[in-house]
Every structure is written in C-alpha cells, then in structure tokens.
Amino acid sequence: MVIEEIDKIVGMFNDLMKEIAAVLETLKKEDIGDILEKEPELLKRLFDIGEGMDNLPKMIKDGIDIINESMEAFTRRYDELKQAVDEAGELGINFELSDVPIGFYLEMKEGKISIGLGELEEPTLMIKAEMPTIIKLLTGELDGMEAFISEKIAIEGSAGEAMKILPLQEFMKQLRG
C-alpha cells in the first residue's frame, strides 16, 4: 500500500517538475518586465508559490530522517552492508552539486551511515557532479569507478578513501534488484 502511494506521488512530482521546468524556461527566454507588464497577476502568483512552500524545509528534514532510519535498519538487517560500513571506518563525503545551489554530505562512523544537508567541516572526500549523477552514484545505478574514469564526477581526496564507498555502492545496486 505504501509503495503504491509513493509511486503515485513520485509520478505526480515528476510531472510537476517537468511543468515547472517548462514555465521557468519560458520566463528565462522572455524579459520578465515585459511578461509582468502583459500579465501583472504573475507576480502575485509567484508569491503564492513561495507561500505554498512554507512546509518544504520540514518535508526535506523528514525525508532525510527517513533515509537515515532506513540506512540504519538496512545496516542491522544486511550483514554485507554492516561489514562494508565497518570496514570503511570513519568516512565523510561532501557532495558539491554543480547544477543545484545546495550541498549535502554522507558520513560513515561508528558503524552507521547518515546523510544531511550542508557540508562536513572536515570531509575525507569531496565529490563534485550534477545532482542526477550523484543520485545514480549513491543508488548504485552508476558505478563509481566508471563515473570517475569518464569524468562524470570529480573527486578531491585520497583514492584509497574513495574506494571505501564501492562496497556500499555494490550493496545499493543489489538492493535495487
């Protein structure tokens, strides 16, 4: 039941994002002053959108909390993930997104995996890429070595430390089926 609800929401969200992208592209192509002159209600509508987003920070926080709780449950349930996390030791990765003005991090320590918005003060690694590439990397859809060799990602830090995330990636790939 929950999976069907999530699938429905994901579909609606993806459709909405496509519509928003199309509207934003139109706004970029035309002079905003001309548009506002022709359609003075546009400014009010843009403010309406902003007001409707007041729950967004809580939704993002709740989503991150669910991901972290899921990773904790997976670590308890799957020995191969627990082993990968234990073998990684302490590892902090800041992700710099080249297409979105926001960053996030992944941290492994004390046998746990967590993510969060912002950045770690002293990361072990910095990985730079576009958001879709990072998501594919974290979900195991994109192999880390291939991504690095093909220059889809840039890594700052020790190659040995970067290799520590490969077992986590392999686990996520297997989990996806």
Image (cartoon, rainbow, N blue to C red):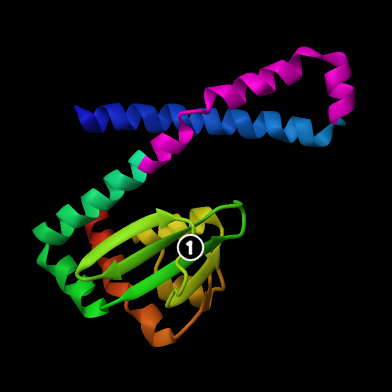
- Estimate how packed mark 1 is, as few (under 14), some (14 to 19) or many (20 or more) residues with alpha carbons within 10 Å: some
Residue 123 in sight from this viewpoint: yes
Residue 107 lies in quadrant: bottom left
Please state if 112 lies on the left or on the right of 107 as rendered: left
Overall secondary structure of the magenta stretch? helix
Residue depicted at x 86% and y 15%: 38
Relative depth, front residue between 150 and 28? 28
Q: Which residue is farthest front?
A: 121
Please state if 157 lies on the left or on the right of 33 as rendered: left
Residue 148 horizontal/vertical position (percent): 50, 75
Q: Which residues are magenta?
A: 32-61
Is 38 drawn above or below residue 167 in the view shown? Answer: above
Give the position of the N terminus as an image quadrant: top left
Residue depicted at x 26% and y 73%: 167
Residue 101 horizontal/vertical position (percent): 61, 52
Residue 177 in sight from this viewpoint: no
Query: According to the image, label 1 marks what residue?
Result: 119
Residue 15 horizontal/vertical position (percent): 51, 29
Please state if 125 lies on the left or on the right of 79 as rendered: right
Is 139 drawn above or below residue 33 in the view shown? Answer: below
Relative depth, front residue between 4 and 86? 86
Give the position of the C terminus as an image quadrant: bottom left
